[in-house]
């Protein structure tokens, strides 16, 4: 290709989506029964792995190639921020991306505020990256993100030498200045959070010495797996049932070719939809089944869900399978709180499954759900009650009396308030499939943060 054409092509590929999903008004929608879900679908790439592919690629010297990248707004926000700090990131095809990194320690001062949109993962992990660079950056986000606590990353990153001016309550907008050199720390996670763990490890990449995170409760381990794959010196040892994850600083990352597996958190909506919709028999291909992410499948199987793992294999260093899901009569259970970190994003849709199960489902130990894109315990309790389910909200969980397969009534005059939370919108869309009159959702725009093809796949599976 001639240089001018190549330049035009790369410009065209640069910004395929607008980061700000809120530039237009709310998009309400009624989700009504569509009939059985059948056939074969494939969900988009894993969000956590997509963010990390871009970030680690941006720190490697040379070209990292990614296929199956999730092209949702959250991931695009990460790409835009990394470009603003010097990385060259191009879309070369559908889900195909090329990243030319700046090298560890090579991030440049961004000239404008970094707009994180709705994405907590982008914000917290990038704060970690910047913490050990001698640059200043400001972070802004939408109303949902601006209400979320950043103190959990500010605390360890301050110990490493970074300084922060946040909005009251440790929220966005905030400005931070990294420390060069940063100070290595040993940090025991006070909350089970892969984002906090990853922020400290990423700061440790450009910090002399060894930075250690102690994880009393295991959380998703994509950062550890991928950092090793990129050539970082990272060790994980178990001491007294806690994971000690240590990263050697002044690291050099070498570029990789990455295939992103399908996102189990997106597959979750279709798994539950198929389980609760009579006549369903759906094959969901290429679903990531890392043990730190697969808790929902275990819980649904304990409830009697017919979920078969077919063609188990490895994709991009992650366990993957195709899931064959059939309509099932579910029974309520007491969900073991110890499983929560491995299905932390799947509780909203589990609550929908529980609403259709026979008997009572009890959940506890879910305080973290109150600080996600919305307060997911309050939002789901209100949403399910408004749709006719019997729900009691506790401080750290929900108790749900299931309908034993009888469709929920559906919403009456008022739409479900989703609080700019994609997973509330998609969960209640699934509830609508198993309702008499349908469920009206106030705003479907946030779905595009993580699962832009959700409605298209719903139509495909139901046709
Ligand atoms: C994520 C970690 C989880 C999860 C989020 C993605 C990640 O957050 O809820 O959607 O990619 O590291 P926490 O670390 O706050 O639990």
Image (spheres, rainbow, N blue to C red):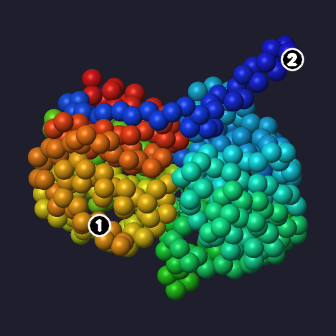
Residue under numbered circle 2: 3
Q: Compared to 353, does 186 lie above or below?
A: below
Q: Position of residue 92 (x, y in %)?
A: 68, 27
Residue under numbered circle 1: 393
Residue at 45% in and 45% down: 422
Residue at 76% in and 54% down: 138
In this view, the residue in front, 115 or 433, is 115
Q: Position of residue 97 (x, y in %)?
A: 67, 34
Is residue 225 in sight in this rendering? no
Q: Residue furthest front?
A: 413
Residue at 76% in and 48% down: 113
Local secondary structure at mark 2: helix
In this view, the residue in front, 256 or 458, is 458
**Viewed as shown, does residue 57 lie left or right of 219?**
right
Local secondary structure at mark 1: strand
Q: Which mark is residue 450?
A: none
How far is mark 2 from mark 1, CA to CA? 61 Å
Is residue 239 in sight in this rendering? yes
Q: Which of label 2 and label 1 is nearer to you?
A: 1
């Amino acid at each position: 290709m001639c240089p001018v054409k190549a330049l035009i092509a790369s410009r065209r590929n640069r910004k395929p989506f607008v980061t700000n999903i809120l530039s237009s008004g709310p998009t309400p929608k009624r989700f009504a029964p569509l009939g059985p879900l059948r056939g074969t679908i494939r969900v988009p790439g894993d969000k956590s792995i997509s963010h990390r592919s871009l970030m680690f690629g941006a720190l490697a010297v040379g070209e990292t190639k990614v296929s199956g990248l999730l092209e949702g707004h959250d991931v695009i926000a990460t790409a835009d921020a990394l470009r603003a700090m010097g990385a060259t990131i191009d879309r070369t095809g559908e889900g195909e991306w090329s990243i030319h990194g700046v090298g560890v320690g090579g991030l440049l001062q961004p000239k404008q505020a970094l707009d994180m949109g709705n994405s907590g993962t982008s914000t917290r992990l990038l704060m970690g990256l910047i913490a050990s660079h001698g640059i200043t950056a400001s972070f802004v986000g939408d109303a949902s993100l601006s209400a979320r606590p950043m103190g959990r990353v500010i605390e360890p990153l301050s110990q490493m030498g970074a300084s922060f001016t946040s909005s009251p309550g440790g929220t966005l907008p905030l400005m931070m200045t990294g420390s060069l050199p940063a100070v290595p720390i040993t940090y025991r996670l006070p909350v089970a959070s892969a984002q906090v763990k990853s922020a400290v490890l990423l700061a440790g990449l450009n910090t002399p010495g060894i930075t250690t995170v102690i994880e009393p409760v295991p959380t998703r381990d994509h950062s550890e797996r991928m950092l090793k794959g990129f050539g970082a010196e990272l060790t994980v040892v178990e001491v007294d049932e806690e994971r000690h994850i240590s990263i050697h600083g002044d690291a050099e990352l070498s570029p990789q070719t990455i295939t992103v597996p399908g996102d189990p958190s997106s597959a979750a909506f279709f798994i539950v939809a198929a389980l609760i919709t009579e006549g369903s028999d759906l094959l969901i291909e290429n679903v990531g089944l890392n043990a730190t992410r697969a808790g929902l499948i275990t819980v649904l199987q304990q409830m009697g869900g017919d979920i078969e793992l077919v063609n188990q294999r490895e994709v991009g260093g992650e366990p993957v399978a195709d899931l064959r899901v059939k309509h099932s009569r579910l029974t309520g259970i007491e969900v073991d709180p110890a499983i929560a970190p491995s299905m932390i994003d799947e509780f909203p849709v589990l609550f929908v499954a529980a609403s259709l199960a026979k008997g009572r489902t009890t959940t506890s130990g879910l305080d973290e759900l109150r600080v996600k894109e919305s307060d997911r315990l309050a939002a789901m309790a209100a949403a399910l009650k408004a749709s006719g389910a019997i729900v009691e909200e506790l401080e750290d969980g929900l108790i749900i009396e299931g309908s034993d397969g009888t469709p929920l009534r559906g919403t009456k005059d008022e739409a479900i308030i989703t609080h700019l939370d994609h997973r509330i919108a998609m969960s209640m869309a699934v509830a609508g499939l198993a309702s008499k009159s349908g469920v009206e959702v106030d705003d479907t725009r946030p779905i595009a943060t993580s699962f832009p093809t959700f409605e298209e796949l719903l139509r495909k599976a139901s046709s």
